[in-house]
Every structure is written in C-alpha cells, then in structure tokens.
C-alpha cells in the first residue's frame, strides 16, 4: 500500500525534506526493530498520513493540488524500505474527512 501511495500521489514537501534519506532509513530501522509501534513512540502512530482531497488544500499561501501527499512522505518510504507492515492513520481527503485507518 505504501508503494502505491508513493507512486500514485505527488509529494508536496520541498526537495530538501523529501530527499532526507537518513531520516527514512532511521524510520525504517525503527519499524523493523518494532520500536515504531511501541506506546513510547505514539507521536508517529497518531499523526495521519495526509493526502489533499478532491478540492485540494490552501495553507499558508501555498496550494496543494488534489492527490498531493501533504504529510507522511518519510513514513511511506520507510514502510516501503523496511518491508514490514505498519499500522497508520491515512486520510486521502484532507481536510474534508479525517481518520481513515489502514
């Protein structure tokens, strides 16, 4: 599912953020080690991976077109790299509907 989301949706984060492979690798290591979903790491578990909905999203003078990954690029790539199953909140219609769990 992570691979499909990455392939099918545009990343909204600036290049200097989405090219941060050190962060992606650290997240992937944590996922493989089972640390990612421990109660102590709730901040990761509770932040939804968000994709701009059918109307897009305007925020701080920037427009995110429909289908744009707003938040979660590092996590999606880490899931793909780790090759483990990770429970995450996914919102494919931000900001219209919040809270689909995948």
Image (cartoon, grey):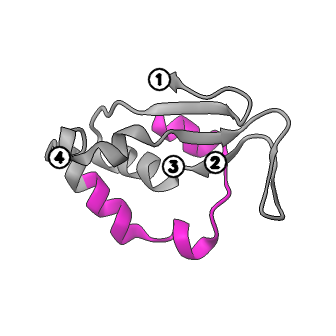
Element under disc 4: loop
- The part of the chain drawn in magenta is 1-28
Q: Is residue 22 magenta?
A: yes
Say which of marks 1 and 2 sits in front: 1
C-alpha span from label 2 to label 4: 25 Å
Q: Which label sits on residue 36?
A: none
To which residue does mark 2 refer? 69
Could you tell which of marks 1 and 4 lies nearer the N-terminus?
4
Q: Provide the residue designation for mark 4.
A: 35
- Alpha carbon distance from label 1 to label 2: 16 Å
- Say whether disc 2 or disc 4 marks the residue closer to the N-terminus: 4
- CB-based contact (under 8 Å), mark 3 and mark 2: yes
Labels 1 and 2 touching (C-beta < 8 A): no
Judging depth in this view, the residue of 80 and 74 nearest the camera is 74
Where does the image place residue 23, in percent across and percent down from the top left? 36, 66
Position of residue 70 in the picture relative to residue 20 (left or right): right
Q: Position of residue 90 (x, y in %)?
A: 53, 32
What is the spatial separation of the Cα atoms under label 1 and label 3, in whole angstroms? 14 Å
Q: Residue at image x 24%, y 45%?
A: 36
User: Secondary structure beneath disc 3?
Assistant: loop
Please give the label number shown on residue 72.
Answer: 3
As helix, strand or loop, the secondary structure at mark 2 comes to strand
Mark 2, other Cα within 10 Å: few <14 / some 14–19 / many ≥20: many
- Compared across the picture, whether 61 is left or right of 20 comes to right
Q: Which mark is residue 101?
A: 1
Residue 66 position by quadrant: top right
N-terminal label among 1 and 2: 2
> Is residue 102 placed above or below 15 in the rendered structure?
above
């Amino acid at each position: 599912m992570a691979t499909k989301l990455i392939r099918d949706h545009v990343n909204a984060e600036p290049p200097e953020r989405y090219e941060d492979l050190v962060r992606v690798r650290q997240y992937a290591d944590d996922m493989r080690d089972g640390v990612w979903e421990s109660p102590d790491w709730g901040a990761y578990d509770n932040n939804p991976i968000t994709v701009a909905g059918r109307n897009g999203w305007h925020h701080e003078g920037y427009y995110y077109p429909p289908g744009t990954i707003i938040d979660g690029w590092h996590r999606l790539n880490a899931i793909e790299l780790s090759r483990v199953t990770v429970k995450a909140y996914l919102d494919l219609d931000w900001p219209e509907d919040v809270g689909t769990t995948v």
